[in-house]
Image (cartoon, rainbow, N blue to C red):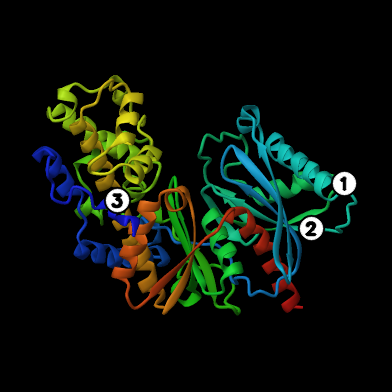
């Protein structure tokens, strides 16, 4: 098993005592992992309770998705996946043979990202029209249901209504905050004479991953994204959702978007945070927020490693006490560097550490410096995997199913084998009674919202 990549330098031979002191603070014991599992569930209950929801760090947002795919869904559906400076339009055909998808990607120019609501949604509608001309030239569809994956903080009022709270990720479109983005999208689509598309559902990327996973595996009850950020969604019984404002008809359940990256923002995980974490947090634009995400996800791990390396240089045990120029810049050390170093270096040879240090201005890094960087990357990855395992283990104990399918997406899981293997290994140790079955869902946000449109159509037929 390749997870031995994280078990390097266990004898601590040749590592300076100053580094070992920092590494000790990064260790997460099994007792601490189990504490995190328990505290996560307490935090989730707080988010579901109307009396404590406003102060809860874990917001537990009802998605209004009440039913997962059951395999009987058929037909052709569209989806719009918007989560960054590119958006994707998909045409999905569900048949007895499975899911057939056509997808095109479109760029959002700067003038659109900083323009008006009419410009923004008009541009999206223009490209959906272009997509339809390219993929459905004969216009054979009377009306296509569309699922909308919208990965921005929103207040959802129903399955097809959500008001934008605030833009993130560099978006600054005027006249959208506080408005129903489904209505704005539909108004733009309705102005198009040549296409008939009806927006039937809006969800975020984590909920979409769960729906896509459930299409392939009917045991799937958790959607998990571990990449730039971390979040999860799962199916909860309505009787546990005190914040629910919808009807109580069957099915008496709803998918909850946990907003798990905020776990710990209320101080409940201080027992595993370190000086390094406080330093990292001080360098972020959202100080005091998304604290567990800052210890796990791909957006932050590279900077965690750089902070440790800078600290050890100032203590005089790395680079002879003189920091290479490149490493002076915040966020210059990418998490992809950690993956390369952990995946390719050994205790005996550290070619990747040497190459990366040279690229950052260390002309001739010593063998000791290369070994030290390798050790830092292994320890940072190990802690990330242990904390991620604790969160997933907490969800498995909440659901209490003998086998739970987990649809997972994101660069930390997909592109970082040492992280993935250690995380799944630790989950099995923490949760021997409730096992996890992971399914990597490619293009989960796009497929998930298209499949959800099919679920809506199936439920409409069932209710007729």
* Residue 49: x %, y % from top left: 40, 67
Q: Going 65% across and 35% down the picture, which residue do you hit?
A: 107
Q: Going 34% across and 78% down the picture, which residue do you hit?
A: 433
**Depicted 70 relative to depicted 423: above or below:** below
Q: Pick out the residue farthest to the front.
A: 348
**Depicted 362 relative to depicted 95: above or below:** above
Q: Which mark is residue 194?
A: 1
Label 2: element kind: strand
Q: Quadrant of the N terminus?
A: bottom left
* Residue 97: x %, y % from top left: 72, 69
Front residue of 148/431: it is 431
Q: CA distance from mark 1 to mark 3?
A: 56 Å
Report which residue position mark 3 lands on: 5
Label 1: element kind: loop
Report which residue position mark 2 lands on: 144
Front residue of 228/312: it is 312
Can I make out residue 346 in this image? yes
Closest to the camera, between mark 2 and mark 3, is: 3
Choose the circle earlier in sequence order: 1 or 2: 2
Label 3: element kind: helix
Can I make out residue 266 in this image? no
Residues tagged 2 and 3 counted as in contact (Cβ below 8 A): no
Q: Using a 10 Å C-alpha cutoff, classify the residue at mark 2 as few (fewer than 14 neighbours), some (14 to 19) or many (20 or more).
A: some
Q: Quadrant of the C terminus?
A: bottom right
* Residue 414: x %, y % from top left: 47, 52
* Residue 248: x %, y % from top left: 57, 77
């Amino acid at each position: 098993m390749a997870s031995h990549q994280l078990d390097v330098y266990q004898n601590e031979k040749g590592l300076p005592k100053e580094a070992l002191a920092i590494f000790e603070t990064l260790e997460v014991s099994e007792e601490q992992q189990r504490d995190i599992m328990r505290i996560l569930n307490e935090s989730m209950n707080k988010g579901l309770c109307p009396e404590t929801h406003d102060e809860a760090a874990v917001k537990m947002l009802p998605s209004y998705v009440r039913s997962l795919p059951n395999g009987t869904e058929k037909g052709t559906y569209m989806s719009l996946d918007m989560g960054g400076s590119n958006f994707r339009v998909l045409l999905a055909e569900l048949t007895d043979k499975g899911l057939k998808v056509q997808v095109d990607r479109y760029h959002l120019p700067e003038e659109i990202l900083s323009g008006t609501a009419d410009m923004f949604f008009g541009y999206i509608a223009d490209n959906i029209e272009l997509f339809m001309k390219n993929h459905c030239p004969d216009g054979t569809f009377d009306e296509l249901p569309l699922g909308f994956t919208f990965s921005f903080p929103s207040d959802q009022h129903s399955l097809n209504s959500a008001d934008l709270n605030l833009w993130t990720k560099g978006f600054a479109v005027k006249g959208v905050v506080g408005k129903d983005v489904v209505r704005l999208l539909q108004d733009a689509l309705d102005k198009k004479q040549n296409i008939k598309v009806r927006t039937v559902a809006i969800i975020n990327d984590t909920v979409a991953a769960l729906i896509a996973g459930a299409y392939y595996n009917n045991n799937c009850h958790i959607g998990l994204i571990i990449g730039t950020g971390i979040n999860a969604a799962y199916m909860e019984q309505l009787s546990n959702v005190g914040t629910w404002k919808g009807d109580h008809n069957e099915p008496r359940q709803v998918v909850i978007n946990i907003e798990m990256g905020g776990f710990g923002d209320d101080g409940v995980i201080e027992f595993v945070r370190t000086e390094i974490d406080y330093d990292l947090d001080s360098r972020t634009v959202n100080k005091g927020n998304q604290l567990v995400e800052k210890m796990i996800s791909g957006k932050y791990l590279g900077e965690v490693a750089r902070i440790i390396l800078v600290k050890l240089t100032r203590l005089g045990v790395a680079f002879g006490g003189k920091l290479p120029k490149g490493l002076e810049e915040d966020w210059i050390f990418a998490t992809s560097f950690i993956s390369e170093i952990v995946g390719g270096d050994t205790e005996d040879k550290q070619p990747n550490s040497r190459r990366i240090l040279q690229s950052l201005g260390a002309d001739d890094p010593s063998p000791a410096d290369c070994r030290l960087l390798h050790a830092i990357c292994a320890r940072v990855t190990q802690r990330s995997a242990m904390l991620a395992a604790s969160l997933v283990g907490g969800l498995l104990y909440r659901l209490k199913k003998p086998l739970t399918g987990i649809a997972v997406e994101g660069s930390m899981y997909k592109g970082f084998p040492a992280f993935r293997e250690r995380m799944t290994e630790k989950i099995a140790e923490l949760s021997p009674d409730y096992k996890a079955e992971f399914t990597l869902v490619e293009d989960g946000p796009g497929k998930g919202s298209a499949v959800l449109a099919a679920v809506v159509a199936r439920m409409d037929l069932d209710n007729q």
